[in-house]
Amino acid sequence: MNSYLIQIFSFWIATFLIWYLIIPYYIDFLKKLKLWKQIREEALVWKAMEFFKLHKDKAWTPTMWWAIILAIIFLMVIVSLWLQHFHITNNSLLNQKETYLCLFTLATVWFLWLVDDYMNIKWIWKKWLSARFKMFWLIVFALLWSMWFYYKLWWNLTDINWDYLKTLKIPFWWAFQLWVYFIPFFIFIIIASANSVNITDWLDWLAWWLLLFAYSVYAYISYDQWLFLLSTLCLVIIWSLIAFLWYNVKPAEFYMWDVWSLALWANLWIIAVLTNTITVFLIVTAIFILETISVIIQITSKKLRKWKKVFRIAPFHHHLEAIGWSEEKVVFRMWLIWIVLSVVWIIVYQLQ
């Protein structure tokens, strides 16, 4: 375990040093390429003029922060392979049991939404990827992820008992045997909550702090379950989020954009399944889930009640802005709610 602790902290420090050295140059690079954030007036249903008025001052801020995060994560993977090759460490971050599926998830989601984000930034409106097209490919990716998990991890790994992962544990109740039904269950969760982080975004420090909290939870859980390489990967992502948040203090110097919000959310779900802590996942991501539900309620109301709205703006945190809450008040109160949830997840995890 001591060797793993050394490896974990070494990668954490290395990630910090890389971020410290390259961030200023990367911000200048984004500005030179004119990769600005665009605030559109269109919504899924009708217009989003009230939202546009609240956030139009955030236009022309550099975005595409996700590109450098992905590059650094895979740079750490390459470094770990190099260290393993020269017998400096015993294990690399490219590991079938712990990190294959996470890295594959990050890469595939990144590839799909890369095109969509670029079109958004450059205002290529006629070639905008449709929601139906993106949903189709997301289902394909989710199917691949679930089948890999079910057939490769559960059936081919003999050094660890993975059968317990086929059971959905619910504290104070009973355990459900999912078996092959795990595949549609897995896909349903990905599709149902695909844009949860993106929906919770648009307030400086809100979505990404909540995501940082969630990854911190899983860095601890994976370490507690002796999944040390997975814990290391979580810490690399955590430090990347810390670096992003350092420059995201209002007024933000750049933004993440959609591709990385979806990739980080999908990867978090993968980690929850790997650690068999789906109930904990639902608790630590409760704010994201509730924000998504508020959007579903709003869209349903508009379609069924002749454009009548339940909220001034959806998702709910924008509704709070519209009724007079400051951006800072919304963010800090959401953090306080998460602190309460953090106590709940600790209790639930200990009971599992």
Image (cartoon, rainbow, N blue to C red):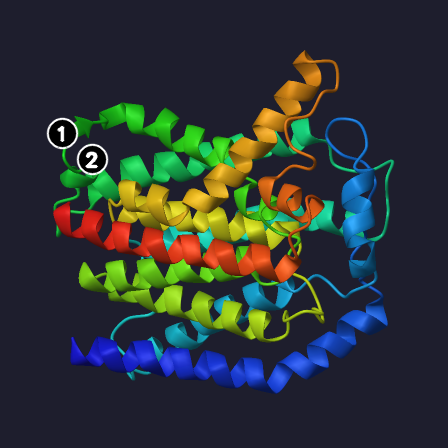
Depth check: 102 or 247 in front? 247
| Crowd band around label 2 with a 10 angstrom C-alpha radius: few (<14), some (14–19), many (20+) | some
Residue 235: quadrant of the picture: bottom left
Question: At which x and y percent is residue 284?
Answer: 37, 50
Q: Is residue 40 left or right of residue 270?
A: right
Q: Amino acid at mark 2?
A: Ile
Q: Which mark is residue 319?
A: none
Tell me what residue is drawn at x 70 percent, y 20 percent.
Answer: 302
Tell me what residue is drawn at x 61 percent, y 62 percent.
Answer: 328
Tell me what residue is drawn at x 28 percent, y 71 percent.
Answer: 91
> Which SS class for mark 2?
loop
Residue 275 visible in the snapshot? yes
Q: Up-down: is 112 above or below 207? A: above
Answer whether labels 2 and 1 touch (C-beta < 8 Å): yes
Q: Which residue is mark 2?
A: 170
Question: At which x and y percent is residue 248?
Answer: 63, 69
Q: Amino acid at mark 1?
A: Trp
Question: At which x and y percent is residue 190?
Answer: 46, 36
Residue at mark 2 to residue at mark 1: CA–CA distance: 6 Å
Depth check: 229 or 198 in front? 198
User: Which residue is outermost to the front?
Assistant: 324
Q: Is residue 288 left or right of residue 7?
A: right
Residue 277: quadrant of the picture: top left
Q: Quadrant of the C terminus?
A: top left
Residue 119 visible in the snapshot? no
Question: At which x and y percent is residue 94?
Answer: 37, 63
> Which SS class for mark 1?
loop
Q: Which residue is mark 1?
A: 174
Q: Up-down: is 66 above or below 350? A: below
